[in-house]
Image (spheres, grey):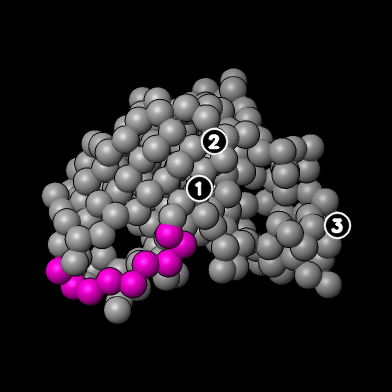
Amino acid sequence: EVQLVESGGGLVQPGGSLRLSCAASGFTFSSYSMNWVRQAPGKGLEWVSYISSSDNTIYYADSVKGRFTISRDNAKNSLYVQMNSLRDEDTAVYYCARGDHSSGWLLDYWGQGTLVTVSS
Amino acid sequence: DIQMTQSPSTLSASVGDRVTITCRASQSISSWLAWYQQKPGKAPQLLIYKASTLESGVPSRFSGSGSGTDFTLTISSLQPDDFATYYCQQYNSYSPTFGQGTKLEIK
């Protein structure tokens, strides 16, 4: 059974940093691209970042470019996002999601999410 | 970025009704369109991909159609478990985008 479990969320002040993790199991993690998607409270879904299976291709949404860094450790079956210079508008539930083999941006499995709150 | 526009934003319906949600892309995305269902406090779940292909395990009352810029999600006979929020998503480009969501409510 495919499982994605996010962790690392919490309360952080504006301008602060946070690192989220996503532990994957139930599939060959190194064979799949991965994504982060976020959802602000009461709002819709926003794609944040993508990393290919071998981490040689990375993309970011304009809203986080230069502040967030996605990475993965295939030996540990883990996905990460380092979030710096956090803003109020980064407050959201952050989901990790697996990219389908046919298209890395077709999100076939999602974690349960971790809440990041940016507030003073 | 490709903009995705869903309508309606809210839909009130009864168990057994046939409902349709539409999604329009700001430019052609061929058939690179997915639909997700999200229940309160839960992660989205993939229902349909490539505009009309049902994900494994999804009931056959769900169907999708369309290509280019105009797409629809149809639920042929609403069940109590179907009341949720539905999102379309284009995955034609490296910057995937979602519609704003359609909340399906019990009438």
Residues packed near mark 1 inside 10 Å, few (<14), some (14 to 19) or many (20 plus):
many
Say whether residue B10 is magenta: yes
Q: Secondary structure at mark 1?
A: strand
Instruction: Name the N-terminal-most of marks 2 and 1.
Output: 1
- The quarter of the rendered structure image containing the C terminus of chain A is bottom right
Residues packed near mark 3 inside 10 Å, few (<14), some (14 to 19) or many (20 plus):
some
Q: Give residue A103's position: percent from left, percent from top.
A: 41, 27
What is the CA distance from the residue labelled 2 to the residue labelled 1? Answer: 8 Å
Q: What residue is drawn where x is 37% and y is 67%?
A: B11
Q: Chain of mark 2?
A: B
Q: Does residue B100 lie above or below B92 as drawn?
A: below
Residue denoted by label 1 = B5
Depth order, front residue of B4/B34: B4
Q: Is residue A98 left or right of residue A17?
A: left
Tell if the residue under mark 3 belongs to the same chain as the one under mark 2: no
Q: Give residue A13's position: percent from left, percent from top.
A: 81, 66
Q: What residue is drawn where x is 57% and y is 63%?
A: A43
Tell if the residue under mark 2 belongs to the same chain as the one under mark 1: yes
